[in-house]
Image (cartoon, rainbow, N blue to C red):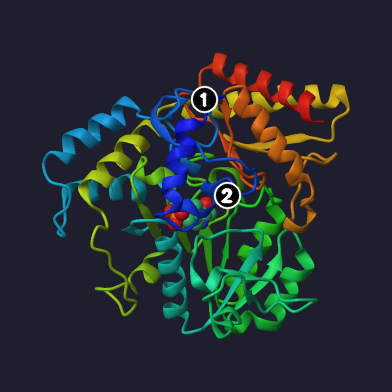
Amino acid sequence: MKRDRSEQLYTEALELFPGGVNSPVRAFRSVGGTPLFFTRGEGALLHDVDGNTFIDLCLSWGPLILGHAHPAVVEAITKRVALGTTFGAPTEEENKLGRLIVDHIPFVDRVRFVSSGTEAVQSAIRLARGATKRDLLLKFDGCYHGHVDSLLVNAGSGLATFGTSSSAGVPEELAKLTLVVPLNDMDALETVFREHGAQLAGAIIEPIPANNGLLLQERTFLQRLRELCTAHSTVLILDEVISGFRVGFRGSFDIYGITPDLVTYGKIIGGGMPVGAYGGRLDLMKQVAPEGPVYQAGTLSGNPVAMAAGLAQLTECLKPGFYEALEAKTATLCATVNTHAKAKGYAYHLDHIGSIFWGFFADADHIRRADAIESASMKTYAKLHAALLERGVYAAPSGYEVGFLSSAHTDAQVQQVALAMCEALDEVM
Ligand SMILES: *Cc1c(COP(=O)(O)O)cnc(C)c1O
Protein backbone atom coordinates (compact mmCIF):
# COMPACT_ATOMS: atom_id res chain seq x y z
CA MET A 1 0.00 0.00 0.00
CA LYS A 2 1.35 3.38 -1.02
CA ARG A 3 1.54 5.99 1.72
CA ASP A 4 4.08 8.50 0.39
CA ARG A 5 1.78 11.49 0.08
CA SER A 6 0.13 10.86 3.49
CA GLU A 7 3.61 10.64 5.01
CA GLN A 8 4.62 13.97 3.44
CA LEU A 9 1.48 15.69 4.63
CA TYR A 10 1.84 14.25 8.12
CA THR A 11 5.44 15.49 8.31
CA GLU A 12 4.18 18.97 7.48
CA ALA A 13 1.25 18.66 9.92
CA LEU A 14 3.69 17.84 12.72
CA GLU A 15 5.07 21.36 12.33
CA LEU A 16 1.60 22.86 12.55
CA PHE A 17 -0.48 20.97 15.10
CA PRO A 18 0.25 19.25 18.42
CA GLY A 19 1.07 15.68 17.42
CA GLY A 20 0.22 16.62 13.83
CA VAL A 21 -3.54 16.43 14.38
CA ASN A 22 -6.57 18.37 15.56
CA SER A 23 -7.98 15.51 17.66
CA PRO A 24 -5.65 13.03 19.39
CA VAL A 25 -6.81 9.57 18.30
CA ARG A 26 -6.39 10.54 14.63
CA ALA A 27 -2.61 10.41 15.11
CA PHE A 28 -2.53 6.56 14.91
CA ARG A 29 -0.45 6.43 18.11
CA SER A 30 -2.14 3.27 19.34
CA VAL A 31 -1.83 1.35 16.06
CA GLY A 32 1.44 2.85 14.84
CA GLY A 33 2.29 4.14 11.38
CA THR A 34 1.23 7.32 9.66
CA PRO A 35 -2.35 8.56 9.69
CA LEU A 36 -3.92 8.53 6.26
CA PHE A 37 -4.98 11.80 4.68
CA PHE A 38 -8.28 11.54 2.85
CA THR A 39 -9.56 13.49 -0.11
CA ARG A 40 -13.01 12.17 -0.76
CA GLY A 41 -15.79 9.99 0.54
CA GLU A 42 -18.69 8.51 -1.36
CA GLY A 43 -21.17 6.17 0.27
CA ALA A 44 -19.21 3.56 2.20
CA LEU A 45 -15.94 4.40 0.44
CA LEU A 46 -13.02 6.61 1.44
CA HIS A 47 -10.27 7.73 -0.96
CA ASP A 48 -6.87 8.82 0.33
CA VAL A 49 -4.23 11.14 -1.12
CA ASP A 50 -2.16 8.20 -2.41
CA GLY A 51 -4.99 6.81 -4.50
CA ASN A 52 -5.98 4.03 -2.09
CA THR A 53 -9.66 3.23 -1.57
CA PHE A 54 -11.12 1.79 1.62
CA ILE A 55 -14.47 0.60 2.87
CA ASP A 56 -15.00 2.88 5.85
CA LEU A 57 -15.96 1.41 9.23
CA CYS A 58 -15.13 4.55 11.20
CA LEU A 59 -17.50 7.01 9.47
CA SER A 60 -15.97 10.07 11.11
CA TRP A 61 -16.46 8.33 14.50
CA GLY A 62 -20.19 7.93 14.10
CA PRO A 63 -21.93 10.92 12.50
CA LEU A 64 -22.23 9.52 8.97
CA ILE A 65 -25.10 7.06 9.35
CA LEU A 66 -25.98 7.59 5.66
CA GLY A 67 -22.35 7.20 4.56
CA HIS A 68 -20.28 9.90 2.87
CA ALA A 69 -21.79 12.62 0.72
CA HIS A 70 -25.34 11.29 0.78
CA PRO A 71 -27.22 13.10 -2.03
CA ALA A 72 -30.00 14.41 0.23
CA VAL A 73 -27.50 15.87 2.70
CA VAL A 74 -25.29 17.34 -0.01
CA GLU A 75 -28.30 18.94 -1.66
CA ALA A 76 -29.60 20.41 1.61
CA ILE A 77 -26.21 21.91 2.47
CA THR A 78 -25.58 23.24 -1.04
CA LYS A 79 -28.97 24.89 -1.27
CA ARG A 80 -28.69 26.50 2.11
CA VAL A 81 -25.04 27.59 2.04
CA ALA A 82 -25.50 29.99 -0.90
CA LEU A 83 -28.01 31.99 1.13
CA GLY A 84 -25.57 32.86 3.88
CA THR A 85 -24.11 30.59 6.51
CA THR A 86 -24.95 32.29 9.78
CA PHE A 87 -26.87 35.30 10.99
CA GLY A 88 -26.58 35.11 14.76
CA ALA A 89 -30.35 35.35 14.70
CA PRO A 90 -33.13 32.77 14.49
CA THR A 91 -33.88 30.91 11.25
CA GLU A 92 -36.71 28.61 10.20
CA GLU A 93 -34.23 25.73 9.82
CA GLU A 94 -33.76 25.64 13.60
CA ASN A 95 -37.49 25.28 14.10
CA LYS A 96 -37.64 22.43 11.61
CA LEU A 97 -34.90 20.37 13.23
CA GLY A 98 -36.14 21.30 16.70
CA ARG A 99 -39.67 20.22 15.75
CA LEU A 100 -38.44 16.90 14.38
CA ILE A 101 -36.71 16.14 17.66
CA VAL A 102 -39.39 17.37 20.05
CA ASP A 103 -42.11 15.55 18.09
CA HIS A 104 -40.29 12.22 17.96
CA ILE A 105 -38.49 12.01 21.29
CA PRO A 106 -41.05 11.64 24.08
CA PHE A 107 -38.81 12.92 26.89
CA VAL A 108 -37.57 16.05 25.08
CA ASP A 109 -39.95 18.93 25.84
CA ARG A 110 -37.38 21.57 24.88
CA VAL A 111 -34.04 21.35 23.12
CA ARG A 112 -31.06 23.71 22.82
CA PHE A 113 -28.64 23.40 19.89
CA VAL A 114 -24.89 23.78 20.40
CA SER A 115 -21.91 22.94 18.18
CA SER A 116 -20.39 19.75 19.61
CA GLY A 117 -21.07 16.81 21.87
CA THR A 118 -18.68 18.21 24.45
CA GLU A 119 -20.58 21.47 24.54
CA ALA A 120 -23.88 19.62 24.93
CA VAL A 121 -22.56 17.61 27.90
CA GLN A 122 -20.93 20.61 29.54
CA SER A 123 -24.17 22.56 29.27
CA ALA A 124 -26.28 19.68 30.60
CA ILE A 125 -24.12 19.25 33.70
CA ARG A 126 -24.20 22.99 34.37
CA LEU A 127 -27.97 22.83 34.09
CA ALA A 128 -28.14 19.86 36.46
CA ARG A 129 -26.04 21.76 38.99
CA GLY A 130 -27.96 24.98 38.54
CA ALA A 131 -31.36 23.33 38.85
CA THR A 132 -30.52 21.21 41.91
CA LYS A 133 -28.19 23.73 43.59
CA ARG A 134 -25.84 20.83 44.25
CA ASP A 135 -22.25 20.35 43.08
CA LEU A 136 -21.42 16.64 42.93
CA LEU A 137 -21.61 14.60 39.74
CA LEU A 138 -21.60 10.85 39.22
CA LYS A 139 -19.95 9.25 36.22
CA PHE A 140 -19.06 5.70 35.23
CA ASP A 141 -15.60 4.34 34.54
CA GLY A 142 -15.43 3.50 30.84
CA CYS A 143 -17.83 6.20 29.65
CA TYR A 144 -16.55 9.18 27.67
CA HIS A 145 -18.39 12.46 27.55
CA GLY A 146 -16.09 14.72 25.55
CA HIS A 147 -13.31 16.88 26.96
CA VAL A 148 -15.44 18.47 29.68
CA ASP A 149 -13.21 19.42 32.65
CA SER A 150 -15.48 17.88 35.29
CA LEU A 151 -15.61 14.57 33.41
CA LEU A 152 -11.91 14.15 32.60
CA VAL A 153 -11.58 12.17 35.79
CA ASN A 154 -10.59 8.66 36.78
CA ALA A 155 -11.77 6.70 39.76
CA GLY A 156 -9.62 7.38 42.82
CA SER A 157 -7.41 4.61 44.14
CA GLY A 158 -8.84 1.73 46.14
CA LEU A 159 -12.46 2.04 47.12
CA ALA A 160 -12.51 5.85 46.96
CA THR A 161 -15.16 7.06 44.55
CA PHE A 162 -13.96 10.68 44.46
CA GLY A 163 -12.30 11.30 41.12
CA THR A 164 -8.78 12.35 40.29
CA SER A 165 -8.16 14.35 37.15
CA SER A 166 -7.15 12.36 34.08
CA SER A 167 -5.80 15.36 32.16
CA ALA A 168 -3.27 17.97 33.10
CA GLY A 169 -5.03 21.29 33.51
CA VAL A 170 -8.05 19.92 35.35
CA PRO A 171 -7.82 21.17 38.96
CA GLU A 172 -8.01 18.40 41.55
CA GLU A 173 -10.53 20.55 43.43
CA LEU A 174 -12.84 20.22 40.44
CA ALA A 175 -12.09 16.53 39.85
CA LYS A 176 -13.05 15.83 43.47
CA LEU A 177 -16.58 16.97 42.72
CA THR A 178 -17.00 14.01 40.37
CA LEU A 179 -17.59 10.56 41.79
CA VAL A 180 -16.67 7.59 39.62
CA VAL A 181 -18.03 4.05 39.87
CA PRO A 182 -17.58 1.04 37.56
CA LEU A 183 -20.19 0.12 34.99
CA ASN A 184 -22.33 -2.95 35.64
CA ASP A 185 -21.62 -2.84 39.39
CA MET A 186 -24.91 -2.71 41.27
CA ASP A 187 -23.28 -2.66 44.72
CA ALA A 188 -21.08 0.33 43.90
CA LEU A 189 -24.12 2.11 42.46
CA GLU A 190 -26.21 1.51 45.59
CA THR A 191 -23.33 2.57 47.83
CA VAL A 192 -22.56 5.83 46.05
CA PHE A 193 -26.20 6.91 46.23
CA ARG A 194 -26.53 5.81 49.86
CA GLU A 195 -23.47 7.87 50.82
CA HIS A 196 -23.76 10.86 48.51
CA GLY A 197 -27.21 10.80 46.90
CA ALA A 198 -28.38 13.95 48.70
CA GLN A 199 -25.46 15.95 47.24
CA LEU A 200 -25.54 14.55 43.72
CA ALA A 201 -26.63 17.16 41.17
CA GLY A 202 -26.47 14.76 38.27
CA ALA A 203 -25.54 11.29 37.15
CA ILE A 204 -24.27 10.98 33.60
CA ILE A 205 -23.92 7.74 31.66
CA GLU A 206 -23.65 6.56 28.09
CA PRO A 207 -26.62 4.17 28.21
CA ILE A 208 -24.80 2.32 25.43
CA PRO A 209 -21.15 2.85 26.40
CA ALA A 210 -19.28 2.94 23.09
CA ASN A 211 -16.14 5.00 23.61
CA ASN A 212 -14.02 2.51 25.51
CA GLY A 213 -15.01 -0.64 23.78
CA LEU A 214 -18.70 -1.46 23.54
CA LEU A 215 -19.64 -2.17 27.15
CA LEU A 216 -23.29 -3.15 26.84
CA GLN A 217 -25.14 -2.78 30.12
CA GLU A 218 -27.99 -4.85 31.42
CA ARG A 219 -31.33 -3.10 31.51
CA THR A 220 -31.64 -3.76 35.25
CA PHE A 221 -28.53 -1.65 35.90
CA LEU A 222 -29.81 1.32 33.91
CA GLN A 223 -33.25 0.91 35.46
CA ARG A 224 -31.78 0.95 38.97
CA LEU A 225 -29.80 4.09 38.13
CA ARG A 226 -33.06 5.69 36.99
CA GLU A 227 -34.78 4.73 40.25
CA LEU A 228 -31.95 6.00 42.43
CA CYS A 229 -31.81 9.32 40.58
CA THR A 230 -35.55 9.76 41.05
CA ALA A 231 -35.37 8.83 44.73
CA HIS A 232 -32.57 11.35 45.38
CA SER A 233 -33.78 14.12 43.03
CA THR A 234 -30.57 13.69 41.05
CA VAL A 235 -30.77 14.69 37.38
CA LEU A 236 -30.23 11.64 35.15
CA ILE A 237 -28.34 12.67 32.02
CA LEU A 238 -28.18 10.07 29.26
CA ASP A 239 -25.28 10.92 26.99
CA GLU A 240 -26.51 9.73 23.60
CA VAL A 241 -23.94 11.54 21.50
CA ILE A 242 -23.10 8.21 19.83
CA SER A 243 -26.24 6.16 20.42
CA GLY A 244 -28.81 8.87 19.66
CA PHE A 245 -30.40 8.35 16.23
CA ARG A 246 -27.95 5.43 15.80
CA VAL A 247 -29.49 2.34 17.43
CA GLY A 248 -32.97 3.68 16.74
CA PHE A 249 -34.31 7.17 16.18
CA ARG A 250 -34.90 7.53 19.92
CA GLY A 251 -31.51 6.07 20.75
CA SER A 252 -31.24 3.82 23.77
CA PHE A 253 -34.89 4.48 24.62
CA ASP A 254 -35.83 2.21 21.71
CA ILE A 255 -33.87 -0.61 23.36
CA TYR A 256 -34.08 -0.13 27.12
CA GLY A 257 -37.03 2.22 27.52
CA ILE A 258 -35.23 4.26 30.19
CA THR A 259 -36.34 7.92 30.36
CA PRO A 260 -33.69 10.51 31.21
CA ASP A 261 -34.25 13.93 32.73
CA LEU A 262 -31.79 15.39 30.25
CA VAL A 263 -30.30 13.90 27.10
CA THR A 264 -27.27 14.98 25.08
CA TYR A 265 -26.82 14.54 21.34
CA GLY A 266 -24.04 15.11 18.83
CA LYS A 267 -22.55 13.24 15.88
CA ILE A 268 -25.54 12.00 13.79
CA ILE A 269 -27.73 14.98 14.69
CA GLY A 270 -25.60 17.29 12.50
CA GLY A 271 -25.48 15.23 9.31
CA GLY A 272 -21.68 15.60 9.28
CA MET A 273 -21.70 19.27 10.31
CA PRO A 274 -20.74 20.40 13.84
CA VAL A 275 -23.95 20.14 15.86
CA GLY A 276 -24.71 19.06 19.39
CA ALA A 277 -27.86 19.42 21.45
CA TYR A 278 -29.18 18.95 24.94
CA GLY A 279 -32.78 18.71 25.92
CA GLY A 280 -35.28 17.15 28.24
CA ARG A 281 -37.86 17.94 30.89
CA LEU A 282 -39.65 21.25 30.65
CA ASP A 283 -39.02 22.38 34.22
CA LEU A 284 -35.28 21.78 33.79
CA MET A 285 -34.98 23.35 30.35
CA LYS A 286 -36.85 26.41 31.64
CA GLN A 287 -33.80 27.05 33.84
CA VAL A 288 -31.67 27.82 30.76
CA ALA A 289 -30.96 31.44 29.76
CA PRO A 290 -32.72 33.62 28.74
CA GLU A 291 -35.70 31.93 30.42
CA GLY A 292 -33.78 30.96 33.54
CA PRO A 293 -30.54 31.58 35.45
CA VAL A 294 -28.28 28.91 33.87
CA TYR A 295 -26.15 30.68 31.29
CA GLN A 296 -25.26 29.02 27.99
CA ALA A 297 -24.78 30.55 24.53
CA GLY A 298 -23.05 30.05 21.16
CA THR A 299 -22.19 32.29 18.21
CA LEU A 300 -22.73 29.57 15.59
CA SER A 301 -25.32 27.56 17.53
CA GLY A 302 -28.20 26.46 15.31
CA ASN A 303 -26.67 27.95 12.17
CA PRO A 304 -28.86 27.21 9.14
CA VAL A 305 -26.30 25.16 7.19
CA ALA A 306 -25.71 22.75 10.06
CA MET A 307 -29.46 22.59 10.76
CA ALA A 308 -30.20 21.80 7.11
CA ALA A 309 -27.64 18.99 7.11
CA GLY A 310 -29.06 17.50 10.30
CA LEU A 311 -32.61 17.79 9.06
CA ALA A 312 -31.78 16.05 5.78
CA GLN A 313 -29.99 13.21 7.54
CA LEU A 314 -32.60 12.64 10.25
CA THR A 315 -35.38 12.71 7.66
CA GLU A 316 -33.71 9.75 5.92
CA CYS A 317 -33.38 7.93 9.25
CA LEU A 318 -37.14 8.19 9.79
CA LYS A 319 -37.96 6.21 6.65
CA PRO A 320 -39.66 2.88 7.47
CA GLY A 321 -37.28 -0.03 7.93
CA PHE A 322 -34.16 2.17 8.07
CA TYR A 323 -32.87 0.90 11.41
CA GLU A 324 -33.99 -2.69 10.84
CA ALA A 325 -31.94 -2.87 7.62
CA LEU A 326 -28.86 -1.43 9.32
CA GLU A 327 -29.14 -3.82 12.24
CA ALA A 328 -29.58 -6.82 9.89
CA LYS A 329 -26.40 -5.94 7.96
CA THR A 330 -24.43 -5.50 11.16
CA ALA A 331 -25.73 -8.80 12.57
CA THR A 332 -24.65 -10.56 9.37
CA LEU A 333 -21.15 -9.09 9.55
CA CYS A 334 -20.72 -10.08 13.19
CA ALA A 335 -22.16 -13.57 12.75
CA THR A 336 -19.88 -14.31 9.78
CA VAL A 337 -16.75 -13.20 11.62
CA ASN A 338 -17.76 -14.87 14.90
CA THR A 339 -18.49 -18.19 13.16
CA HIS A 340 -15.05 -18.08 11.55
CA ALA A 341 -13.30 -17.15 14.82
CA LYS A 342 -15.07 -19.94 16.66
CA ALA A 343 -14.26 -22.55 14.00
CA LYS A 344 -10.59 -21.58 14.15
CA GLY A 345 -10.54 -21.41 17.94
CA TYR A 346 -9.56 -17.72 18.09
CA ALA A 347 -10.30 -15.83 21.30
CA TYR A 348 -11.95 -13.00 19.38
CA HIS A 349 -15.53 -11.83 19.36
CA LEU A 350 -17.56 -9.11 17.68
CA ASP A 351 -20.34 -7.73 19.85
CA HIS A 352 -22.92 -5.36 18.42
CA ILE A 353 -26.03 -3.33 19.06
CA GLY A 354 -27.87 -1.79 16.13
CA SER A 355 -25.16 -0.71 13.68
CA ILE A 356 -22.45 -0.25 16.34
CA PHE A 357 -19.98 -3.13 16.64
CA TRP A 358 -16.77 -3.83 18.54
CA GLY A 359 -14.29 -6.67 18.43
CA PHE A 360 -12.36 -7.81 21.49
CA PHE A 361 -9.78 -10.49 22.12
CA ALA A 362 -11.37 -12.71 24.74
CA ASP A 363 -13.45 -15.85 24.90
CA ALA A 364 -16.71 -14.15 25.88
CA ASP A 365 -19.91 -12.85 24.30
CA HIS A 366 -19.83 -9.45 26.04
CA ILE A 367 -17.52 -7.25 28.06
CA ARG A 368 -19.41 -4.98 30.43
CA ARG A 369 -16.73 -3.17 32.44
CA ALA A 370 -13.77 -1.05 31.39
CA ASP A 371 -11.35 -2.92 33.65
CA ALA A 372 -12.26 -6.21 31.97
CA ILE A 373 -10.58 -5.15 28.71
CA GLU A 374 -7.10 -6.68 28.34
CA SER A 375 -4.80 -3.76 27.59
CA ALA A 376 -2.19 -6.18 26.22
CA SER A 377 -4.65 -7.16 23.46
CA MET A 378 -4.23 -3.71 21.92
CA LYS A 379 -0.95 -4.91 20.39
CA THR A 380 -2.90 -7.55 18.52
CA TYR A 381 -5.45 -4.94 17.49
CA ALA A 382 -2.67 -2.85 15.95
CA LYS A 383 -1.73 -5.83 13.75
CA LEU A 384 -5.34 -6.47 12.86
CA HIS A 385 -5.80 -2.81 11.93
CA ALA A 386 -2.79 -2.94 9.58
CA ALA A 387 -3.96 -6.22 8.02
CA LEU A 388 -7.38 -4.64 7.37
CA LEU A 389 -5.86 -1.55 5.77
CA GLU A 390 -3.90 -3.81 3.41
CA ARG A 391 -7.22 -5.40 2.46
CA GLY A 392 -8.93 -2.09 1.79
CA VAL A 393 -10.85 -1.76 5.05
CA TYR A 394 -10.49 1.36 7.21
CA ALA A 395 -11.23 0.56 10.85
CA ALA A 396 -10.81 3.00 13.73
CA PRO A 397 -7.12 3.46 14.62
CA SER A 398 -7.59 2.23 18.20
CA GLY A 399 -8.83 -1.05 19.62
CA TYR A 400 -10.91 0.82 22.19
CA GLU A 401 -13.00 2.41 19.45
CA VAL A 402 -16.13 0.87 18.01
CA GLY A 403 -17.01 0.43 14.33
CA PHE A 404 -20.13 1.52 12.49
CA LEU A 405 -22.04 0.56 9.38
CA SER A 406 -24.04 3.07 7.37
CA SER A 407 -27.08 2.71 5.17
CA ALA A 408 -24.68 3.20 2.23
CA HIS A 409 -22.80 -0.05 2.90
CA THR A 410 -24.09 -2.53 0.32
CA ASP A 411 -24.49 -6.21 1.11
CA ALA A 412 -21.54 -6.90 -1.20
CA GLN A 413 -19.37 -4.41 0.72
CA VAL A 414 -20.42 -5.98 4.02
CA GLN A 415 -19.39 -9.39 2.66
CA GLN A 416 -16.07 -7.89 1.55
CA VAL A 417 -15.50 -6.51 5.06
CA ALA A 418 -16.39 -9.87 6.63
CA LEU A 419 -13.96 -11.69 4.35
CA ALA A 420 -11.21 -9.16 5.06
CA MET A 421 -11.76 -9.52 8.80
CA CYS A 422 -11.60 -13.33 8.62
CA GLU A 423 -8.38 -13.18 6.57
CA ALA A 424 -6.87 -10.53 8.82
CA LEU A 425 -7.65 -12.69 11.86
CA ASP A 426 -5.98 -15.68 10.18
CA GLU A 427 -2.93 -13.52 9.66
CA VAL A 428 -2.59 -12.15 13.19
CA MET A 429 -3.98 -14.85 15.51
C1 LIG B 1 -18.16 11.90 20.76
C2 LIG B 1 -18.78 11.94 22.12
C3 LIG B 1 -18.78 13.11 22.90
C4 LIG B 1 -18.05 14.35 22.48
O1 LIG B 1 -18.55 14.90 21.31
P1 LIG B 1 -17.63 15.93 20.47
O2 LIG B 1 -18.51 16.37 19.36
O3 LIG B 1 -16.44 15.12 20.03
O4 LIG B 1 -17.26 17.02 21.39
C5 LIG B 1 -19.46 13.09 24.10
N1 LIG B 1 -20.11 12.00 24.51
C6 LIG B 1 -20.13 10.86 23.80
C7 LIG B 1 -20.91 9.70 24.30
C8 LIG B 1 -19.45 10.80 22.58
O5 LIG B 1 -19.47 9.65 21.90
Counting residues from the N terminus, which is met first, the one under dot 2 or under dot 1? 1
Q: Which quarter of the figure has residue 64? A: top left
Q: Is residue 378 left or right of residue 282?
A: right
* Residue type for callout 1: Phe
Which of the two marks, 2 or 1, is nearer to us in this view? Answer: 1
| Element under disc 1 | strand
Q: Residue 353's spot in the image, x, y percent? A: 63, 38
Residue situated furthest top in the rendering: 412
* Gap between marks 2 and 1 measured at Cα: 37 Å
Q: Residue 142's spot in the image, x, y percent? A: 66, 58
Q: Which quarter of the figure has residue 163? A: bottom right
| Element under disc 2 | loop
Q: Residue 97's spot in the image, x, y percent? A: 29, 46
Give the residue at x 44% y 32%: 5
Q: Is residue 16 visible?
A: yes
Q: Is residue 240 visible?
A: no
The crowding category of the residue bearing disc 1, from other C-alpha atoms within 10 Å (few below 14, some 14 to 19, many at least 20), is: many
Q: Which residue is mark 1?
A: 54
Give the residue at x 36% y 68%: 285
Looking at the image, residue 77 lies above or below residue 175: above
Looking at the image, residue 156 lies above or below residue 246: below
Give the residue at x 52% y 54%: 24
Q: Which residue is mark 2?
A: 257
In the image, 370 versus 249, the foreground residue is 370
Give the residue at x 37% y 31%: 316
In the image, 253 versus 169, the foreground residue is 169
Q: Is mark 1 within 8 Å of ligand 1?
A: no
Which quadrant does the N terminus fall into? Answer: top right
